[in-house]
Amino acid sequence: MLAPFEKPVNVARPFLPSLDDFRDGLKEIWDNHWLTNNGPIVQRFGRELSNYFETDNICLFTNGTLSLQIGLQGMGIAGEAITTPFTFVATTHALFWNKIRPVFVDIEPDFYTLDPEKVEAAITPWTTAIVAVHVFGHPCKLNVLADIARKHNLKLIYDAAHAFGVRVGSKSIAHFGDMSMFSFHATKLYHSIEGGMLTFQDSGIKGIFDYLKNFGFENEEEVVMPGTNAKMNEIQALMGSMVLKHLDDIIEKRRQIAAVYREKLESVPGIYLRPELPKDVRYNYAYIPVEVDEKEFGMSRDQLYKELKEYNIYSRRYFYPLVCDFACYKSVAVKDPLTVARKVAERILTLPIYYDLDLDDVQRICDIIIAIGSKERDH
Ligand code: T4K
């Protein structure tokens, strides 16, 4: 039997800049005596991200969830939005907080993004938006969804929480749809401890987002709308700015990790990796999702998930259960049978990937998975 890892190997682990660099950065904050409320580092970070994303139409927030929540509010989305149940629960929560009814439809089996045919079939007179997720950083069916949105006069909103750094053709993924939300949470390949960002096509809407994240203040005497508090602070911006400098390195290391997983697991009976992405996609290697076929592998996904813990490997079942199966959304009527999403949610397992995961350790994780499977099949 292969030996368990001495230290836990988690599904994610944040990239950290050197402590010396961060300390130097903190000195600037100490000198400024300015911690939040659109401080100089947040403003500088905003300019860096504008350069990176090649657009001035960005707005920074304290986290991804509030970014999406405020984005939907600022765009005036109401009634129903067609969305995916195969996502982190925050996508749906952002709808809920805006009193928008989620209409869950199925995903497609290769990349787990919304199935456009199902989207079109679910449109009603109350539909105002499609809220699609580039789940695991896999781009949605961008052109088809754009055509549907245009044809039916719907807003097309992307939860791009997983998609930092993804490009399609010559453009950043941020340039598709009416608005996209990026999460900068610590568990993401790119992070600012916590943090979030909206990118959008209509420059006129930026002012609304700025009001909404800062209590609706116009000035000391005027509040123009009932906003909330969703501002990014200076320490978040400092971290975000420092991690951004290492982004190419981070993505390259993740590419190498993903390549080892593919090479080692591709031919394992009952373990399915997603197909290669289309050639025009520059991927960010955000997650390593695999599907486990119980019969072929010799044990269920849940058994493998448990067994890996015995080896100190903490994979995650992103995204199981489906959002519509959580108690708080059970009362939402779901017309679509969600055939693909249900099957995927039962089989999906996301494996560890992070910057300082050694390639030898990736080999070892794969060897452990292979050994667990063959032990069961030979039983
Ligand atoms: N939309 C989508 C599609 C999303 O996936 C998310 C967030 C959002 C919207 C909302 O964005 P934010 O509001 O979060 O910006 C994690 C993250 O907390 C969450 O951001 C993320 N999606 C989701 C997919 O994963 P948990 O509950 O699984 O996190 P947790 O604490 O179990 O951490 C995962 C692993 O990371 C653990 O094994 C330990 C490790 N870890 C975690 C933290 C926080 C570290 O090594 N260091 C750390 O600092 O949700």
Image: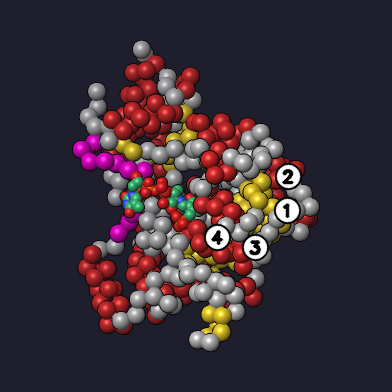
Q: Is residue 233 left or right of residue 361?
A: right
Estimate how packed mark 3 is, as few (under 14), some (14 to 19) or many (20 or more) residues with alpha carbons within 10 Å. some
Name the residue at 30% across, 81% down. Answer: 33
Q: Which residue is mark 2?
A: 122
Q: Nearer the viewer, residue 107 or 52?
A: 107
Does residue 7 sit above or below 35 in this rendering? above
Q: CA distance from mark 1 to mark 4?
A: 18 Å
- The CA distance from mark 3 to mark 4 is 13 Å
Identify the residue position indicated by label 3 in the image.
Answer: 178
Q: CA distance from mark 3 to mark 2?
A: 20 Å
Q: Callout 4: helix, strand or loop? A: helix
Q: Which residue, given by chain and number where applicable, does mark 1 sit on? A: 127
* Secondary element type, mark 3: loop
Residue at the disc numbered 4: 68
- First-in-chain label (3 vs 4): 4
Q: Is mark 4 within 8 Å of ligand 1?
A: yes
Image depth: mark 3 or mark 1 in front: 1
Residue 118 position in % (x across, y down)? 70, 41
Q: Residue at x 40, y 61 (%)?
A: 194
